[in-house]
Amino acid sequence: MKEQDCLRRFLFEELGLRGEWVRLEHSWQQAKQYQGLSCGVQEKLGQAMAAASLLSATIKFEGAMIMQAEGNGPLKTLVAQATHDRKIRGLARGKTDMEAGSLLEMMGQGRMVITIDPKKGEPYQGVVALQDDKLAEVISRYFVQSEQLQTQVWLFANETHAAGLFLQELPAQESYKADWERVSLLADTVTEEEMLTLDCEQMLYRLFNEEKVRLYDAEPISFECGCSAEKIESALLTLGEQELQTLLKEQQQINVDCEFCGEKYSFDSVDVQSLLTNQSAQAKSDTRH
Ligand SMILES: [Zn+2]
């Protein structure tokens, strides 16, 4: 059976370099099934989700890592999220039926915000410019900027699979420039076909058979949205009572479909009234204490 929906880390034992490999199949297909995206947009979202999976390996606490790219091109937004336990989700907004093109052609220029959001504590945000032909170049630059370590990322996706490869020098270790150059040149020979079809071990052998590489156990990845009625309710409350009443007048009930998983939530006037009552009761008790 093919190795799918997992992340594998590896280490070049004699060099100060580490790597990660990821390939998504079911998780990728589930994540995009409600969005009706063209092949071109699927390629970009799949790459973003492979990247989020690679980045999730750096989360050292309970929480999530959210990559959000916003551009001034026809494809406005790409969001990819991964949690510490490798639950992923993602979405695309804008002209989601557009033909395949470079990232620059599809998204234009803008920025990518990477948010590290721990369950406990304050979120941390990093920003990197969106101005490249490939998403992999944006992600590589983010790592170099934020961690000050040589890093390179390769990303591939089609309608059935999404895959990513990551190489980084280890911190606090004298990595020789020549090692980095040799290994990253070898990695650069990887093809889309290989990344989307070969298992991790086969791929490592194909690329680095002269190097001593230690491969760690596979860490499973799955699609899970994490949306809930409570989260939708608190999003609705931010609209304010007046806006909610106007929406209710127009359409009897407020319907919200989760953009990530297609889950449908609806609230009638009774639901909305009780939300508002709870909110004001909560506010009163907060002021009392
Ligand atoms: Zn959802």
Image (spheres, rainbow, N blue to C red):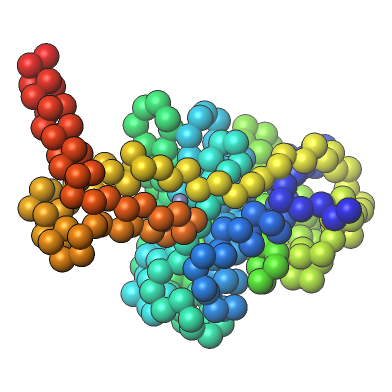
Residue 269 position (above or below residue 100): above
**Side (left or right) of 140 relative to 156:** left
Res. 204 in view: no
Residue 208 position (above or below residue 104): above
**Side (left or right) of 152 relative to 281:** right
Name the foreground residue: 241 vs 260.
241
Res. 199 in view: yes
Question: In the picture, which quadrant includes the C terminus?
Answer: top left
Residue displayed at 49% across by 83% down: 98
Q: Residue furthest bottom?
A: 99
Name the foreground residue: 169 vs 104.
104
Residue 279 position (above or below residue 41): above
In the rendered picture of this protein, how many numbered marks are placed on residues?
A: 0
Q: Residue furthest top?
A: 289
Percent from the top left, x then y, of residue 201? 87, 50
Residue displayed at 60% across by 71% down: 43
Percent from the top left, x then y, of residue 38? 55, 79
Percent from the top left, x then y, of residue 241? 10, 48
Q: Quadrant of residue 93?
A: bottom left
Q: Quadrant of residue 256?
A: bottom left
Residue displayed at 7% across by 53% down: 242
Residue displayed at 64% across by 54% down: 27
**Side (left or right) of 47 relative to 245:** right
Name the foreground residue: 257 vs 170.
257
Percent from the top left, x then y, of residue 104? 46, 77
Residue 178 position (above or below residue 64): below
